[in-house]
Structures are given as C-alpha cells and as structure tokens.
Amino acid sequence: GPMHMEMMPPPAMAGMDADMMGNMPPHCMGGMNADHMGNMPPECMAGMDGPMMHMMPPEAMGGMGPMHMEMCPPDAMGGMGPMHMEMCPPDVASAMSPAQAEMMPGGPGPMADMDGDGMPPPAWGDGAAAGGSPLDGMAPIGDPMGAPPMGGDPMGDAMGGPPMGGTPMGDPGAPPPAFDGAMAAMDTAASANMAEGMEAANTAADAADAAAADAPADDAPTDDVV
C-alpha cells in the first residue's frame, strides 16, 4: 500500500523494473516522492498507467528526468492533473511527445493547443529530435495579435509615432517653448544676413553701372597722335 512505498528507502528504487511497476497497485503510488522517482530507473516508467499516474503525488514529478518522460506510455498521461504539470521540470516537459500530450485530460490535452492553431504542442520534443531546441516552434511570448510588450515599446512606433506611454520630449507637433525661441532667433539672424548680403550686392551693381557710364565709347575720337 502507500505506506510501503513511503517507507521504502529511495536508493532501493534502483532495483525496480517495468514488471515490478506494472504489478504495483495504483494506490501504492500515493507514497512516492521526488527522491523515489529520482532513484528509479527510467525503464520502470514503461509499467506505469493512467491510474498510477493519477495516484502519484505531484511532488514526485520533481524527481523525473527527460528519460523518464520518454519511457512513459502515452496512456499513462491520462492520469496527469494540473499540479503534475506544474511540478514537472522544464527539461522533462521538453521530452514530451505529441502522442503523450494528446492523451492528457481535456480533449487533445491541456498542453496540446497552447498557440491556438488546433495542432498538438509544436515540437515538444520534436525540436530536440531535429537537432534544435526542444522549444523550437512554440509561440513567442507576448500578444499573438502583435501588440507591443507591457510597459511600452522601447523602440517606438516603426512608422514614426511616439513610444507607448508618451514621449519624454512631449508632443512631436508642439515643440517646447525653449526650442521655439531658439528657432525664432535663428530665423531672425538668417533674415538679417540675407538682407545685408542683398544690400551689398545692390551697391556693387550700382558702382559697376556708374563706372560703365563714365567710360568713353570704343569708337570715340581721341587726341592721341599715332
């Protein structure tokens, strides 16, 4: 019964095999803990079924390794509950196959359609088999509709809008008063320089016209003796 398992020294689990696990009454699993699971050879998981998983305390999931998950029959996943999944180490979850996820309670499994595409968990274990990350293919964290992360978009709107939450410089259409004053001063200086330049150019043109008027014509007679 559960007390037999509870009183079993964890190192003794190293001698268990799949046949022993398969012949164990499901309620015996109630005495299992993470140390028992950690010392149990992964091959023993082949003898587990749904009722045994259901009776196993969620805390025992903490002792599982990826090989335990790989050796677990898909139908045994039918005994899992939310707390089992919550206590499952991330590297163990990454070894879960689509067939195992489909057998979890809740239709195709509570983990089978995390991204809402109607498909089993994207590459839960398939990514590692393909040489990539076990999490390859999973939906990125954030709003699936493309909204910026909470707290605002640090890069601002790609089309030129201010970042969410306002811009530290104020409204782009209404520059600060100090900025307006500096621009006004620059405009005044530019206008003065332009007027001064035009006046100087006009004076030079008038002088050139006067000099041309005083000069004799090319065919005018002169008193010079050749």
Image (tube, rainbow, N blue to C red):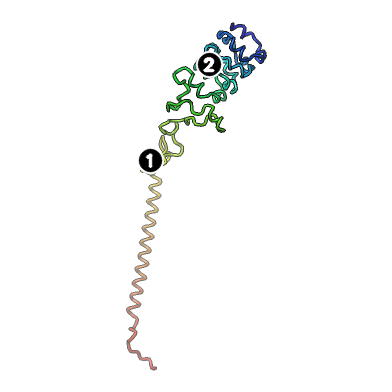
Q: Is residue 13 above or below residue 191?
A: above
Residue at the spot x=58%, y=17% of the render?
46
Q: Residue furthest bottom?
A: 226
The residue closer to the viewer here, 3 or 27, is: 27
Q: Is residue 6 above or below residue 222?
A: above
Q: Amino acid at mark 2?
A: Ala
Other-residue count near label 1 (Cα within 10 Å), few / some / many at <14 / 14–19 / ≥20: few
The residue closer to the viewer here, 41 or 4, is: 41
What's the distance in space between the residues labelled 2 and 1, CA to CA?
A: 60 Å
Which label number is shown at residue 76? 2
Residue named by callout 1 = 171
Residue at the spot x=47%, y=17% of the render?
105
Q: Nearer the viewer, mark 2 or mark 1?
A: 2
Quarter holding the N terminus? top right
The image shows residue 66 at horizontal and vertical percentages of 59, 23
Q: Quadrant of residue 165?
A: top left
The residue closer to the viewer here, 162 or 158, is: 158
The image shows residue 54 at horizontal and vertical percentages of 52, 12
Q: Amino acid at mark 1?
A: Asp
Q: Quadrant of residue 63?
A: top right
Q: Quadrant of residue 203?
A: bottom left
Residue at the spot x=54%, y=15% of the render?
58
